[in-house]
Structure formats: structure tokens, C-alpha cells
Image: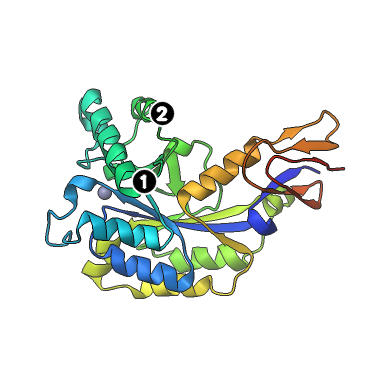
Amino acid sequence: MAVFMRFPGFRDKAVTLSYDDGADADRRVVELMTKYGLKGTFNINHKAIGGAADHTMTAEELFALYRDSGNEVAVHGAEHFSLTEVDMAMATRDILSNREYLESMTGGIVRGMAYANGAESEEVQRMLKNCGIVYSRSVVSTHKFGLPKNWLSWDATCHHGDKELMTLVDQFLNGPMPGYLWARHPRLFYLWGHSFEYANNNDWHILEAFGQAFEGRDDVWHATNGQIYDYVKAFDSLVYSCDGTMIHNPTATDVYLDYFRRQICIKAGETVKAR
Ligand SMILES: [Zn+2]
């Protein structure tokens, strides 16, 4: 007997995508994501915008694309520095100037990130915290469906070029859930890559097949990286009475629970009798 988070609508699964570098091929990625109702986060190193053969979209076009499709924009470093390989003042400036630019272009608060070149360390994580970054994706594939223990080292399930991709999708959607505890925990499928990889390899069928697999699956929540972070933090913020009969939700988000095998939704700001 225990308490388990459920995603909105009591769903026990969520899927999120993460694409880096903001190349022109993001347009096709967004088209396919919209076609299949997928959501995700685009990590933008803004100094590259308009600067190369596959970066011809203007900043206005690029940010309109993400905004109009309901996707998130996140930090990738202004100049795509490997943060572990440069002076920490330069690294800090690379993150803050990127964050400030993205906030000016989106009109919103930007707190997410993906590590350029996967370059992360404990020192870099401390710096990111001081820069107001709350989550950052690595380039590690876990082949698993758990939520991150350290949000500043958020490992993906896999890259879209992974040979195991569709096997993992099948396991995620249809696989047996061995063990009692495993059966009760929510699952997250986290896919990442670069849109130019699809363009260079002409393998858009991978993203089509991925989207098709999720069609009609009402048990899966489609969310950006930031929406998942915010939702888990709302769950973490719930306040329980000593005997568990009362739960208070101090956040602005409705939270869904599997509470000792009962489904309970605690609306934003409410206190409920739970047992
Ligand atoms: Zn990159």
C-alpha cells in the first residue's frame, strides 16, 4: 500500500520529445509532432540562427513555429559550448545570455535546458542552479521509463536512431509490468535527437512510426519536458496530515493520485479528505 503519482486524467504513462540545435528541419519535426499530437522541447543555441545552410529560418519564423504548435523552447547555450571545457565565467555567460534571449523571444520564463555535446559535471550543475535552470537533458540513453532522480542530469529513454526504439515503444505501451511496485509507478518515454539527422539520413519514417504507435492511446499524456517537470514538482508539493486522511495541494496545478489503490484528484489549492 502506498501513494503513487498519476499524470493528468489518472494516466499512468507520459511521452515527451527533445530536439536540439534549432535547424530548418525542425519545421518537419513540428509538423509530424502536431499530426500525432506529440509534444516536446526545442533546445536552441541562438547564435546559430540564420548562420548556416541548414539554419536559414529567421528567429521570428523559428519561434513562431514552436509557439504556434504549443511546444517548449529551452536553453542549449548561446554558442553551444561544451560547458565542462570552458572557463566557468564563460560557461555562465553562455547560459544566461541564451536564457535571456529565449525569454525575450518567447515572452515567457525559460527554465529548461539540454547540455550541448552532453558536457555535464557537478560544477556545471551548480552553475546552472544559480542561473535559474531547473532541468537539463543529458545524451545518455537508459532504455528505461523512469522519472529522473536528478533533474539536472535528465537521461532520455533513447535517441530516435536507436535500433531498439520500436521495441522499447512496444514495451512501454504494451509490455507486462513485472513486480508490484513497478506496476504502480508512472512511466515516461523520453525521446531525443536532432531534426537535421532525419533530414540528412532521410529517415523521417522513424518519427512517423513513433507517432503512429501512440495514436488512440488515451492512457498516455503528451507533454513538454517543462510540463512534466512542473507536474512532478506539484505532486512533490502535496502536504499530508499525519494519519493520511487529509491532503492539501498548495500549487496551481490539479494533481492526480493512486492513493492506497484509490484514484483521487486534488484540485489546485484544495484540501481533501482522502481515506
Ligand atoms: Zn546541440
Q: Position of residue 248 (x, y in %)?
A: 74, 36
Q: Which residue is mark 1?
A: 107
Packing grade of label 1 (10 A; few <14, some 14-19, many >=20) is few
**Residue at figure coordinates x 53%, y 37% from the top left:** 149
- The three-letter amino acid code for the residue at tag 1 is Gly
- Point out the image quarter for the C terminus: top right
Packing grade of label 2 (10 A; few <14, some 14-19, many >=20) is few
- The three-letter amino acid code for the residue at tag 2 is Lys
Label 1 within 8 A of ligand 1 by Cβ: no
Quarter location, residue 268: top right
Q: Is residue 126 visible?
A: yes
Q: Position of residue 220 (x, y in %)?
A: 59, 63
Chosen colour scheme? rainbow
Q: Which mark is residue 129?
A: 2
SS type, badge 2: helix
Q: Is there CB contact under 8 Å for labels 1 and 2?
A: no
Quarter location, residue 98: top left
Asked if residue 234 lies left or right of residue 75, the reply is right
Quarter location, residue 129: top left
Relative depth, front residue between 211 and 130: 130
Q: Is residue 11 visible?
A: no
SS type, badge 1: loop
Relative depth, front residue between 35 and 146: 35
Q: Position of residue 141 (x, y in %)?
A: 42, 51
In the rendered image of this protein, does residue 11 appear above or below residue 181? Answer: below
